[in-house]
């Protein structure tokens, strides 16, 4: 039986999550990408709390017109870096959530790195 696209991603996601865990010192940076939007959150897996979150649906990012989805992802990456540094988070573990490190995900990660996050 062939796997669907979604099942394949979830299988990869489970394999990644076995190895990647966020702690209080080094929380997990989890990314979700839909067809239209991209959202990202920094999670402490020991307590189960979301420390910081950013999305392309936030007012400052959503109001920008005439930008493509990769540029939108860059804005989300810089936004999460700003919010994380305000909370005192400088290093994170990157969780691509089963998505390929390419395109929007890559531009988001590079923007977060240039914003000051280490992973």
Image (cartoon, grey):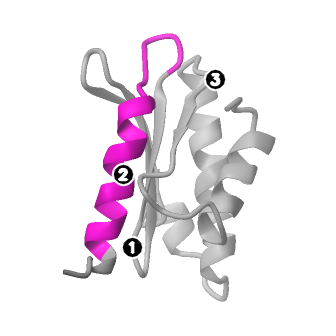
**Left or right of 40: which side holds 50?**
left
Tag 1's secondary structure? loop
Distance (Cα) linking label 1 and label 3:
25 Å
Tag 2's secondary structure? helix
Mark 3 Cα within 10 Å, few/some/many (few <14, many 20+)?
some
Foreground mark, 2 or 3?
A: 2
Q: In this view, does 27 lie above or below 104?
A: above
Q: Are marks 1 and 2 in contact (CB under 8 Å)?
A: no
Q: Which residue is rendered at x = 65% and y = 67% of the image?
A: 102
> In the rendered view of the protein, which quadrant contains the C terminus?
top right
What residue is pinned by disc 2? 13
Residue 16 position, x and y percent, is 42, 43
Q: Which residue is rendered at x = 66% and y = 74% of the image?
A: 70
How many circles with numbers are drawn on the protein?
3
Mark 1 Cα within 10 Å, few/some/many (few <14, many 20+)?
few
Distance (Cα) linking label 2 and label 3:
21 Å
Q: Earlier in the sequence, mark 2 or mark 3?
A: 2
Q: What stretch is highlighted in magenta?
A: 6-26
């Amino acid at each position: 039986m062939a796997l669907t696209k979604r099942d394949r991603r979830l299988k990869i996601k489970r394999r990644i999550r076995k190895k990647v865990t966020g702690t209080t010192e080094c929380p997990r940076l989890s990314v979700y990408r839909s067809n239209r939007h991209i959202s990202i959150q920094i999670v402490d897996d020991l307590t189960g709390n979301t420390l910081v979150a950013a999305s392309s649906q936030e007012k400052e990012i959503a109001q920008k017109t005439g930008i493509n989805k990769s540029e939108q992802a860059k804005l989300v990456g810089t936004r999460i870096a700003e919010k994380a540094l305000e909370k005192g988070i400088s290093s994170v573990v990157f969780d691509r959530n089963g998505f390929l490190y390419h395109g929007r995900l890559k531009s988001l990660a590079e923007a977060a790195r240039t914003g000051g996050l280490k992973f």
